[in-house]
Amino acid sequence: MLAYLVARRTSEIGVRRALGAARSHVVFIVFRESIAPVAIGLAGSAATIVATRWVQSLFFGVSASDPSTMSAAALIFIAVAAAAAALPAYRASRIDPMRALRIE
């Protein structure tokens, strides 16, 4: 999904690069877009903690509000999201401004 969003914004990224945006700025833009789904997922994890009584029946040998388990799950979630955003961010940073402007 993120690769599709980056592909749709090729001309915008090309304009930014043509006007002097650094590759690191383009990578930052793509990573910033990937944060929204991560934030929604972490909010869902927080909602799970609130529903501890129901969640307690799903966990075996771990309490529903175990902070180390929840922290580990959040860190894994963030790491997977960063890994998924890395390739589209790299591709976006490699866009040739002149080629992107010719697409339109």
Image (tube, grey):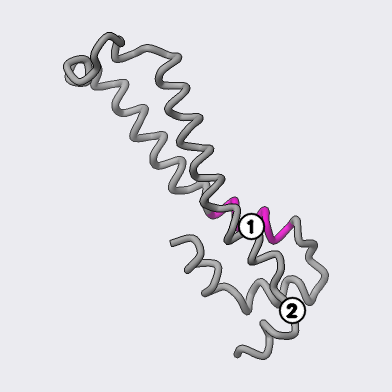
Q: Is residue 27 magenta?
A: yes
Quarter of the figure with residue 56: top left
Q: As drawn, is 11 to the left or to the right of 19?
A: left
The residue lying toward the viewer, choosing from 31 and 36, is: 31
Q: CA distance from mark 2 to mark 1?
A: 16 Å
Q: Tag 2's secondary structure?
A: helix
Which residue does the image show at 57% across and 73% down from the upper left? Answer: 9
In the picture of the structure, the residue carrying the numbered disc 2 is 97
Q: Secondary structure at mark 1?
A: helix
Tag 2: residue type? Pro
Residue 29, numbered circle: 1
How many numbered circles are shown?
Answer: 2
Q: Residue 71, percent across and down?
A: 47, 21
Q: Main secondary structure of the magenta part?
A: helix
Q: Residue at left 63%, top 75%? A: 12
Is residue 60 inside the magenta stretch?
no
Q: Amino acid at mark 1?
A: Ile
Quarter in which the N terminus is drawn: bottom left
| Span shown in magenta | 25-33
Q: Residue at x 38, y 34 (%)?
A: 43
81 lies above or below 55: below
**Horizontal relation, residue 29 to residue 18: left or right:** left
